[in-house]
Amino acid sequence: MGNLEEIKTTLVGLSTIDKLKFLAEQYAGRIIFSTSFGWEDQVITHLIFANNIPIKVFTLETGRLFPETYYVWNRTLEIYNKPIHAYYPQNELLQDMVNTKGPNSFYESVENRKECCYIRKIEPLKRALEGNEIWITGIRADQSANREDMHDLEWDEGNQLIKFHPIFDWTLDDVKTYIQENNIVYNTLHDKGFPSIGCAPCTRAVQPGEDFRAGRWWWEDQSKKECGLHAAS
């Protein structure tokens, strides 16, 4: 396939499903989707699995997920009977951090929190993405301020691949409606004020009027809210 602009031109006018099918055909064996089992990711998982699109689905098993997240993971496997590949932190890196700093060092400083995110998420992600050329995500444009300048198809310089956000232009109401109409299993924490769900110790419900990501690493300054998985390219 050609460059980024050529791909963008080819995708114009196609449905979300047809875009996924086209990319899966053009990048067979080199296209991958990351799910954290939130609203948006469950929509995309359904699009891929229900339409038998040959895209590998994976998740980052940080070891600190909510019980509700594990429930959605398990139900998704049962419903679609298709594999979701789990990537774990490297055992030695995780052990060294916990042995020297304890299990909750991320509360003590931004540096410690970023170290934890790196070990539990960033490093496993790099292993998951290795050898792939297209990374599909559930990012939507209105999820946070620094994502407003993004596009549905973009070059990820840090990971040296193309990222595609198939529901980038969907609103949250669009997502909820699709889930309801297609009877898709979703994380019930969303109904309890959790718009963004990550590791249990680092996620809380947000109050009415708060920013979408106010519940993530709430003890830190707003400008440090990203973990690095989707840092600006």
Image (spheres, rainbow, N blue to C red):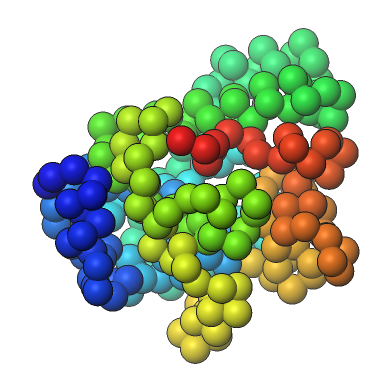
- Residue at 70 percent across and 68 percent down: it is 190
Q: Quadrant of residue 102?
A: top right
Residue, far bottom? 181
Side (left or right) of 118 relative to 84: right
* Residue 103 can be seen, yes or no: no
Q: Quadrant of residue 44?
A: bottom left
Side (left or right) of 144 relative to 182: right
- Residue at 54 percent across and 36 percent down: it is 231
Residue 57 position within the rendered picture, expressed as x and y whole percent measured from the top left = 37, 52
Foreground residue, 84 or 37? 37
Residue 112 position within the rendered picture, expressed as x and y whole percent measured from the top left = 75, 21
Counting the numbered discs, the total is 0
**Does residue 54 lie above or below 132 as drawn?**
below
Foreground residue, 230 or 107? 230
* Residue 10 can be seen, yes or no: yes
Residue 228 position within the rendered picture, expressed as x and y whole percent measured from the top left = 58, 34
- Residue at 61 percent across and 46 percent down: it is 146
- Residue at 74 percent across and 37 percent down: it is 223
Residue 2 position within the rendered picture, expressed as x and y whole percent measured from the top left = 13, 45
**Does residue 119 lie above or below 7 as drawn?**
above
**Does residue 147 lie above or below 176 as drawn?**
above
